[in-house]
Image (cartoon, grey):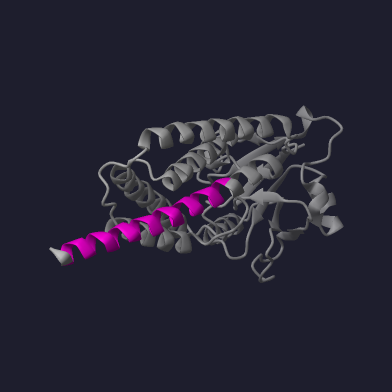
């Protein structure tokens, strides 16, 4: 009987340690996503580039993080957290399998999806091992009311900041819904006739100058890539094998090997002190 009691106590202590750790992870992730939402240019059109989806994730992660700190209905919360972080782990594994450089879980802070998959696995393991010994929490009703008061204030604050803080102007890009290159998930088309007297978006950040002039002088296909992105390597190989004309490959920092792009294709680099977030590869079709 004594051994069972000691075991229950250890699992209860483990539950409190794990829930606080998970809460902090969620709150940090939500904070970084919110920073990305209000201050960073986003280039891409995947589901998680959608500001409304990002904001919904921010609110959910803040809410569940606070819920864990309040330790409300611990047994049901533990089961929900196990399911949630199992889904998170599978998402990170899919990102790693596709060769993505970052999982995107922490906004613009780049974290290897293999690391987040391992982190999620440890969290799930910790949640399985730990368990709250309390079936009923004293003062649970008061905690629940306090939680909703805090969450309402926080939600209103987030919404107000999102509405009042001027978002950086996004580049005038259109999703290309034509049949060409339909295999590339992040293909974008830019039509200069719809934005008269404007230079190509992002052009000012591309070096050297002759690459900028070349891009702005006619119909072009501009490929933004990273040297350590497996999907980028696949796209580059396919485009080079097709011997497509008027293609410019623009490398996004951190910069790597310079011999990745074979001649006669043009190569340039994207150099900017501003926070401009890319989920590579991004292919932009410029139609003059």
Of residues 227 and 21, which is closer to you in this image? 21
Residue sitting at 87 percent across and 32 percent down? 197
Q: Is residue 26 magenta?
A: yes
Query: Can the viewer see residue 235?
Result: yes
**Residue 66 in picture, x, y percent from top left:** 48, 43
Residue sitting at 71 percent across and 56 percent down? 250
Of residues 155 and 227, which is closer to you in this image? 155
Furthest toward the left, the residue is 1
Answer with left or right where residue 71 lies relative to residue 50.
left
Q: Quadrant of the N terminus?
A: bottom left
Q: Which residues are magenta?
A: 3-30
Query: Can the viewer see residue 177?
Result: no
Magenta stretch, overall SS: helix
Q: Is residue 139 above or below residue 273?
A: above
Of residues 205 and 259, which is closer to you in this image? 205
Q: Is residue 163 magenta?
A: no
Of residues 53 and 66, which is closer to you in this image? 66
**Residue 141 in picture, x, y percent from top left:** 37, 33
Residue sitting at 77 percent across and 51 percent down? 274
């Amino acid at each position: 009987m004594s051994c069972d009691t000691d075991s229950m106590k250890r699992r209860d202590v483990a539950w409190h340690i794990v829930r606080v750790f998970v809460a902090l992870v969620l709150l940090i992730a939500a904070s970084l996503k919110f920073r990305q939402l209000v201050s960073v240019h986003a280039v891409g059109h995947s589901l998680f580039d959608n500001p409304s989806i990002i904001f919904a994730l921010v609110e959910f992660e803040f809410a569940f993080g606070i819920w864990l700190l309040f330790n409300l209905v611990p047994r049901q919360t533990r089961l929900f957290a196990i399911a949630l972080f199992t889904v998170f782990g599978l998402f990170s594994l899919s990102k790693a399998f596709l060769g993505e450089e970052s999982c995107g879980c922490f906004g613009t802070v780049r974290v290897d999806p293999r690391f987040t998959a391992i982190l999620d696995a440890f969290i799930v393991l910790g949640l399985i091992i730990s368990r709250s010994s309390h079936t009923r929490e004293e003062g649970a009703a008061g905690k629940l009311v306090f939680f909703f008061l805090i969450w309402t204030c926080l939600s209103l604050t987030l919404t107000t900041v999102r509405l009042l803080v001027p978002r950086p102007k996004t580049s005038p890009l259109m999703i290309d819904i034509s049949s060409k290159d339909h295999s590339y998930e992040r293909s974008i088309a830019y039509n200069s006739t719809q934005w008269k007297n404007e230079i190509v978006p992002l052009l000012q950040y591309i070096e050297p100058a002759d690459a900028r002039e070349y891009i702005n002088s006619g119909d072009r296909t501009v490929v933004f890539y990273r040297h350590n992105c497996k999907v980028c390597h696949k796209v580059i190989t396919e485009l080079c094998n097709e011997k497509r004309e008027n293609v410019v490959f623009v490398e996004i920092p951190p910069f790597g090997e310079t011999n990745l792009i074979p001649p006669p294709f043009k190569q340039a680099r994207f150099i900017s002190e501003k926070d401009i977030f890319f989920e590579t590869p991004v292919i932009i079709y410029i139609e003059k």
